Amino acid sequence: MSRLQSKLEECKARSRKALISFITAGDPTTEHTIPALHALVRGGVDVIELGIPFSDPEAEGPSIQKSSQRALENGVGLESVLQMVQEFREKDSETPIVLMGYLNSILSMADFAEKASNSGVDGLIVVNLPPEEAEDLQSSLRRNDIDLIYLLAPTTTEKRSVLIAEKASGFLYYVSLKGITGAGHIEVDEVASRIESLRGMTDLPLCVGFGIKNAKTATEIGKFSDGVVVGSALVDLMSESVDVDLTAKELESAVSLIRQGLDSI
């Protein structure tokens, strides 16, 4: 069982809703990333998604696009992202790290799965990788105890949802909005209905992201999901500060409020 699977099993056993956070590696500076990761854990985050900067992040809204561009300008690539994970692991051997990025970045590194595993990576989300083309990568990830996590959208058909549920490991990531990250208003009843339908297809934890910006929204979604993903709101917070310590404190405070909301369910 991978570290990610163990953590989500632990959450289930404790009736705890998983809080998953996203930030972009190397944004707003490379010095911010490690303190930010530890601050998220102190604030009550269970799983961390760490974005691999990419020049054309097609699924992302303006906030994450800008964060990716800032990180690229700071010279951050996949190699340095893995170094950051390795540095985080020096003080935290328990919190799962899931990398999120695009296929070109992953294919640019030979022996990616082995190197990622050695760095302490536990999961991978490849936004633009369809399950029909994932077998080679998935096999190498499986050999290295890394879960390949798939996105499901409101527009995903039932037939395709079944296929994705069969291929996925770790958890299923349901995208609550038709569009880019950080956009729009969540139709909670529609998301709840879709999550209920997906439960008939898989025993994997079902986590919901896109559009979750605060404790209120997280709590609404957490009532019927196994976890929530908060990204753009945290990226926006980080973009507004240049002081590393202050940013870490603000992140810890922000996620602790969401944690409190989820714990009230």
Image (spheres, rainbow, N blue to C red):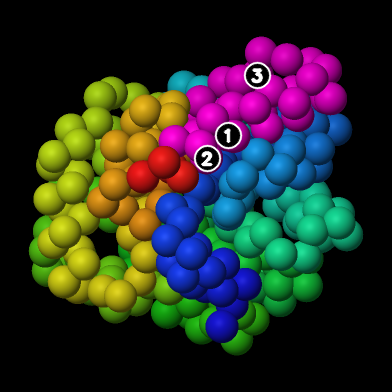
Range of magenta residues: 232-261
Compared to 214, does 50 lie above or below? below
Q: Nearer the viewer, mark 3 or mark 2?
A: 2
Q: Nearer the viewer, mark 3 or mark 1?
A: 1
Numbered circle sitting on residue 259? 2
For the residue pair 232 and 139, the one nearer the viewer reads as 232
Determine if residue 138 is in view.
yes
* Quadrant in which the N terminus is drawn: bottom right
- Does label 3 or label 1 sit earlier along the sequence? 3
The x and y percentages for residue 27 are: 71, 30
Question: Is residue 257 in the magenta section?
Answer: yes
Residue 212 occupies which quadrant of the picture?
Answer: top left
- Does label 3 or label 2 sit earlier along the sequence? 3
Does the CB distance between marks 2 and 1 fall below 8 Å?
Answer: yes
User: What's the CA distance linking mark 2 and mark 1?
Assistant: 6 Å
- Residue receiving disc 1: 255
The x and y percentages for residue 48 are: 60, 50
Side of 90 where 111 appears, left or right = left
Side of 183 where 11 appears, left or right = right
